[in-house]
Structure formats: C-alpha cells, structure tokens
Image (tube, grey):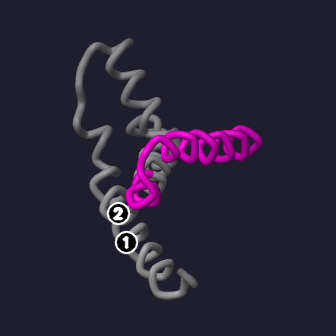
Amino acid sequence: MLFWFIYIFSSLLISYVVSTFFSLKTRTIILFLALALLLTPENMGIGSQKPTPIVFSFIFELIFEQNISIQTLRPLIFSLPLAFTLSLVVLRFKKRFSQT
C-alpha cells in the first residue's frame, strides 16, 4: 500500500515536471498523457492478481525476457484515449470559466 502511495505521488511529480517543458496550450494534454502512461496498471503475470505499473512490466519483459510483447501494452489502448479526452474536457472548462 505504501509503495502505491509513493509511486502515485512520484508519478504526479514527474508528469508535472515533464509537462513544464511544453507550451501552455499543450501542457495539460502532456500532463494527463504522462499520468496515464505512468499510472496504468496491469497484472504481473497470467495467474497473478498483483497489479504492477505497465511501464515497468514492459521494460522488465524487454530486458530480462528479451521479447517485445504487445499484450503487456494492451491496457494503454483504453487509458490513453481516456486521458486525452479528459484533458480536452479540462481544457474546455478552463477556457469556459477562466477570467482572461
């Protein structure tokens, strides 16, 4: 439990720092996409019920098992479009309710 708390907090921090390198218009989109990339979970193995971050699972399979499995990246098919849509909704709210 403590691992996930620390991981989520550090993912928020890393996503924010990465998004500051981009322009103000694309900052929100990059923030949400980086969060989706870092926080998307997947099961560790076929029989396991322990969720692991998808980025680390993919890197683990790439380095130690020496195969590129697209099956590991399958949850990103759902989370990346959802993050992109959510960032567009946030941008609409910002545009609608901002004072400038």
| Residue under the image location 42 percent in, 51 percent down | 23
- Give the number of callouts: 2
Element at badge 2? helix
Determine the CA span between mark 1 and mark 2: 6 Å
* Residue 82 at x, y percent in the picture: 36, 66
Give the residues drawn in magenta, as a range: 1-30
**In which image quadrant can residue 54 be found?**
top left
The amino acid type of the residue labelled 1 equals Leu
Magenta-drawn stretch, dominant element (helix, strand or loop): helix
Say what secondary structure mark 1 lies in. Answer: helix
Q: Which residue is mark 2?
A: 84
Kindly identify the residue that appears in the image at 45 percent across and 47 percent down.
34
Note whether 59 is above or below 91 in the view shown.
above
Mark 2 nearby-residue class (10 Å; few <14, some 14–19, many ≥20): some
State the image coordinates of residue 20 (x, y, percent, origin top left). Answer: 52, 45
Looking at the image, residue 50 sits to the left or right of residue 54; the answer is: right
Q: Is residue 40 left or right of residue 85?
A: right
Residue at 41% x, 80% y: name it. 92
Please state the horizontal and vertical placement of residue 77, each as a whole percent of the image: 27, 54
Q: Which one is in front, 52 or 89?
A: 89
Q: Is residue 16 left or right of residue 69?
A: right
Task: Name the residue furthest right.
Answer: 2
Q: Amino acid at mark 2?
A: Phe
- The question of residue 71 being in magenta is answered with no
Quadrant housing the N terminus: top right
Disc ID at residue 88? 1
